[in-house]
């Protein structure tokens, strides 16, 4: 709020913040300066013409106001050709550079450099998921500085839009097709990422961080981002059976946490949090509190009621193919996570769910 007041107060003073101008955020991508340039150019044209037009209007109102001495009818001037040509041609000429710079910047936004680093983006109600070439999925977008990054984006439910204000880039994310967006961050730092297409109840919480790493740090971050993915199937079993002993015995999996902790984090990271509460409150989806271990859980399968036990299998199918069995009293509103969650992650979620049921 205070920042907003400050920026509005200094509005006309071309307020500068890390290369940002007026009310615009800092410029932290290679494309940002050219976008801002067009914006500022149009803005100052508006200011100049506002002053000329409103100034002349006020002047005329005062100079030609009605007075007892001036009660005659106005003269019958119909038009003035040079004046009219002037006020058409001059603004017309101003449109040429606006088009030129605008088109130039637009082409830069559309033409992806060939060596761009590729990240897949999944949008869903109401979370982002970023997938890296090695298969790691993250709820924040990590990128190297000084290198073009190409986002190939898809939505698993409704229309979303990815927006990074500091980079001046924005692109719709549409179900049933892939859209692309590229940028190059200038230096290491953190930036906000928002969904900027109203996409339902928790749209305003559909945010993420863009973390720009230096070119040297990025590979290290990526290699260590997901220790769980480095385990073999055998090791996953050991990790599930006795987490503490396994973690102690394998210091090479730096940062590996016990299943319960991983599961709790996945609840947030995978976006389950936006529909499933942990405290018993019903949301878009049923709460996870007390869900685990229910013996006679009522679901609808093909429209018919059926009782199931909430065990590993039920949870697994609920996550991968949510439409198969619908928890009674709820809509078929869950995103299918098939292909977007690993079995070991599901097992971690199960371990976490167990802690939410009182024994
Ligand atoms: Cu959205």
Image (cartoon, grey):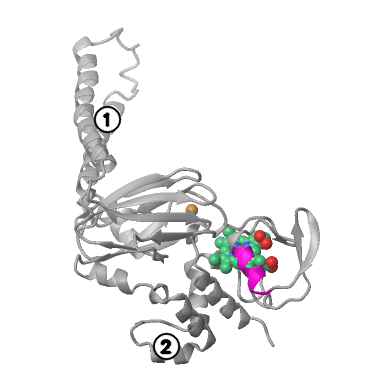
Return the residue at label 1: 53
The secondary structure type at the circle numbered 1 is helix
Q: Position of residue 260 (x, y in %)?
A: 53, 82
Ligand 1 within 8 Å of disc 1? The answer is no
Task: Confirm whether the magenta stretch covers residue 315.
Answer: yes
N-terminal-most mark, 1 or 2: 1
Residue 22 falls left or right of residue 328: left
Q: Report the front residue among 117 and 67.
A: 117
Q: Which mark is residue 247?
A: 2
Residue at point 24%, 19% (across, down): 88
Q: Position of residue 165 (x, y in %)?
A: 32, 54
Residue 341 falls left or right of residue 300: left
* Residue sticking out furthest to the right: 305
Residue 214 falls left or right of residue 342: left
Task: Confirm whether the magenta stretch covers residue 213.
Answer: no
The residue stretch that appears in magenta: 311-319
In three-dimensional space, the C-alpha distance between marks 1 and 2, rounded to whole angstroms, equals 73 Å
The secondary structure type at the circle numbered 2 is helix
Q: Is residue 15 above or below residue 84?
A: below
Q: Position of residue 182 (x, y in %)?
A: 29, 49
């Amino acid at each position: 709020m205070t920042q907003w007041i400050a920026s509005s107060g200094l509005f006309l003073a071309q307020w500068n913040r890390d290369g940002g101008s007026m009310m615009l955020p800092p410029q932290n991508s290679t494309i940002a300066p050219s976008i801002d340039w067009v914006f500022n150019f149009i803005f100052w044209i508006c200011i100049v013409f506002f002053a000329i037009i409103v100034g002349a209007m006020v002047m005329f109102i005062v100079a030609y106001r009605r007075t007892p001495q001036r009660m005659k009818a106005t003269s019958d001037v119909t038009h003035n050709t040079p004046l009219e040509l002037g006020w058409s041609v001059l603004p017309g000429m101003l449109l040429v550079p606006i088009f030129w710079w605008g088109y130039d910047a637009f082409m830069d936004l559309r033409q992806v450099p060939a060596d761009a680093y590729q990240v897949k983006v999944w949008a869903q109600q109401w979370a982002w998921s970023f997938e890296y070439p090695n298969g790691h999925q993250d709820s924040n977008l990590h990128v190297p500085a000084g290198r073009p990054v190409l986002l190939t984006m898809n939505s698993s439910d409704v229309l979303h839009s990815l927006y990074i204000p500091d980079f001046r880039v924005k692109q719709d994310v549409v179900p049933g097709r892939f859209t692309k967006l590229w940028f190059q961050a200038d230096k290491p730092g953190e930036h906000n990422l928002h969904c900027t297409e109203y996409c339902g109840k928790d749209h305003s919480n559909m945010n993420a961080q863009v973390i720009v790493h230096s070119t040297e740090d990025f590979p290290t971050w990526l290699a260590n981002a997901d220790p769980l993915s480095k385990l073999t199937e055998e090791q996953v079993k050991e990790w599930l059976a006795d987490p503490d002993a396994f973690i102690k015995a394998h210091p090479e999996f730096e940062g590996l946490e016990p299943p319960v902790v991983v599961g709790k984090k996945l609840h947030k990271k995978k976006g389950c949090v936006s529909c499933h509460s942990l405290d018993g409150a019903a949301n878009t989806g049923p709460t996870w509190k007390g869900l685990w271990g229910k013996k006679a859980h009522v679901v609808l399968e093909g429209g018919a009621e059926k009782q199931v036990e909430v065990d590993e299998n039920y949870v697994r199918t609920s996550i991968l193919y949510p439409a198969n069995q619908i928890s009674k009293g709820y809509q078929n509103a869950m995103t299918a996570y098939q292909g977007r969650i690993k079995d070991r992650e599901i097992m971690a979620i199960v371990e976490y769910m167990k802690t939410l049921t009182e024994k």
